[in-house]
């Protein structure tokens, strides 16, 4: 079966994959990247994303995005973009579904605090942790630890990496040292992630009441499409008008990305994925759209992510993560047996980071109560 028949020559072809760390026989009815996607969906870490914060804590409302729904939205947008550019949809989907597997509870504040706690023990990067999850921490197979994913999926998961850590990753970390590029599928998934969170954070921010429509009118990208909706559907009720606005905004962003990237690819004329890796980034927004998306991100940072009610959550969450880490480091006997390490403080700290990063929001809250509340014995 030819899974790569409709792909451009510079796309990531599953038949030409750099392979897996542990050699396995072909999957038969599935391509190698479809097999990666299936392993990710069936992983424990993927299921945990349902109860991990995107912006709002999971228990603050049933309709707010979580890491799981965010990952699904990234995969949907990514597949649409990949199809338009004749890139490998299956690889994009696998990368999108796996990109947040290593994220901590409580969103970015959990990552930031855990990185502070780990500063003397190698630090903490959630992209690197996602790779650690699929390479080592998942336990589903008898022949190997982790999920044994292909090089290309692992490459896409690792969006960012410090040079210190890159040097320890061998071929996978080489591009961070020689400044070469990942596959176009990896580049595309990174921007699909941005399109998804920019737009769904607007929706969640307005639904929560932390943002108002009057505030959003200050953002040119949103205001332009809002006015288009009002012109086409005068008097349309609020939620429907918002959904139409966000739909048009996503459409504009994806269309701009496809048009700009198609032109860049045509100009660079890569003949293979090796040419892609040796060239400049080719999946981009136009300068105008990049300026507008940057303005939107700055607006969301100032008005949503740093809203005083979100800050209250951040303070509580940071206290939970920090106090759990300090308690486990001081008394490792508080940890489950599988996470206790004798005689090696570096490995013990990393195990603690694995344990905390793997927690859902509600599990972290319960674990904190078990350890620190006198009402729990």
Image (cartoon, rainbow, N blue to C red):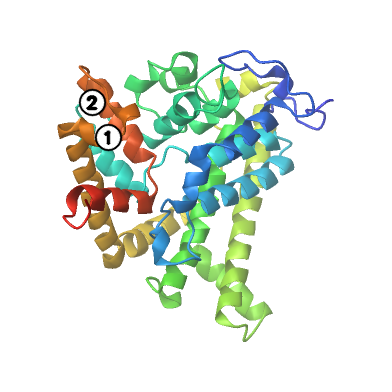
Q: Quadrant of residue 244?
A: bottom right
Judged by depth in the image, the label closer to the viewer, 2 or 1, is 1
Residue that appears at 58% across and 14% down: 22
Q: Which mark is residue 36?
A: none
Q: Quadrant of residue 40?
A: top right
Q: Give percent across and percent down for residue 245.
A: 59, 69
Q: Which residue is mark 1?
A: 335
Is disc 1 placed on a helix, strand or loop?
Answer: loop
Towards the viewer: 236 or 127: 127
Task: Quote the CA–CA distance across marks 2 and 1.
Answer: 18 Å
Q: Residues within 10 Å of mark 2 (few under 14, many from 20)?
A: some
Q: Is residue 174 left or right of residue 238?
A: left
Q: Is 345 situated above or below 332?
A: above
Residue that appears at 62% across and 16% down: 18
Q: Residues within 10 Å of mark 1 (few under 14, many from 20)?
A: some
Is disc 2 placed on a helix, strand or loop?
Answer: loop
Q: Is residue 217 left or right of residue 370?
A: right
Q: Is residue 350 left or right of residue 191?
A: left
Residue that appears at 82% across and 28% down: 5
Q: Which residue is mark 2?
A: 121
């Amino acid at each position: 079966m030819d899974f790569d028949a409709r792909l451009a020559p510079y796309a990531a072809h599953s038949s030409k994959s750099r392979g897996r760390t542990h050699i396995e026989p072909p999957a038969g009815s599935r391509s190698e990247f479809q097999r990666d996607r299936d392993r990710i969906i069936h992983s424990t870490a993927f299921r945990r994303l349902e109860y991990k914060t995107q912006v709002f804590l999971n228990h603050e409302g049933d309709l707010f995005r979580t890491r799981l729904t965010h990952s699904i939205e990234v995969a949907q947008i990514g597949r649409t973009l990949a199809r338009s550019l004749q890139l490998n949809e299956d690889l994009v989907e696998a990368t999108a579904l796996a990109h947040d597997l290593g994220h901590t509870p409580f969103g970015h504040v959990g990552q930031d605090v855990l990185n502070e706690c780990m500063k003397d023990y190698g630090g903490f990067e959630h992209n690197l942790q996602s790779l650690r999850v699929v390479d080592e921490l998942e336990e589903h197979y008898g022949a190997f630890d982790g999920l044994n994913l292909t090089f290309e999926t692992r490459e896409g998961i690792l969006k960012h990496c410090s040079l210190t850590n890159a040097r320890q990753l061998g071929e996978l970390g080489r591009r961070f040292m020689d400044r070469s590029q990942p596959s176009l599928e990896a580049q595309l998934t990174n921007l699909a992630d941005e399109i998804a969170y920019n737009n769904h954070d607007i929706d969640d921010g307005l639904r929560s009441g932390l943002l108002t429509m009057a505030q959003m009118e200050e953002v040119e990208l949103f205001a332009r499409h809002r006015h288009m909706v009002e012109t086409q559907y005068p008097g349309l009720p609020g939620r429907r008008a918002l959904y139409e606005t966000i739909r048009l905004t996503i459409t504009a962003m994806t269309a701009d990305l496809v048009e700009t990237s198609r032109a860049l690819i045509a100009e660079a004329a890569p003949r293979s994925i090796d040419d892609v890796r040796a060239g400049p980034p080719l999946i981009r927004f136009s300068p105008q759209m990049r300026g507008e998306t940057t303005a939107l991100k700055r607006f969301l940072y100032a008005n949503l992510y740093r809203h005083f009610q979100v800050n209250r959550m951040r303070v509580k969450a940071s206290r939970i993560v920090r106090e759990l880490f300090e308690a486990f480091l001081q008394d490792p006997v508080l940890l489950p047996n599988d996470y206790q390490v004798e005689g090696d403080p570096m490995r013990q700290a990393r195990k603690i980071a694995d344990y905390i990063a793997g927690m859902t929001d509600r599990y972290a809250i319960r674990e904190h109560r078990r350890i620190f509340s006198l009402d729990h014995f």
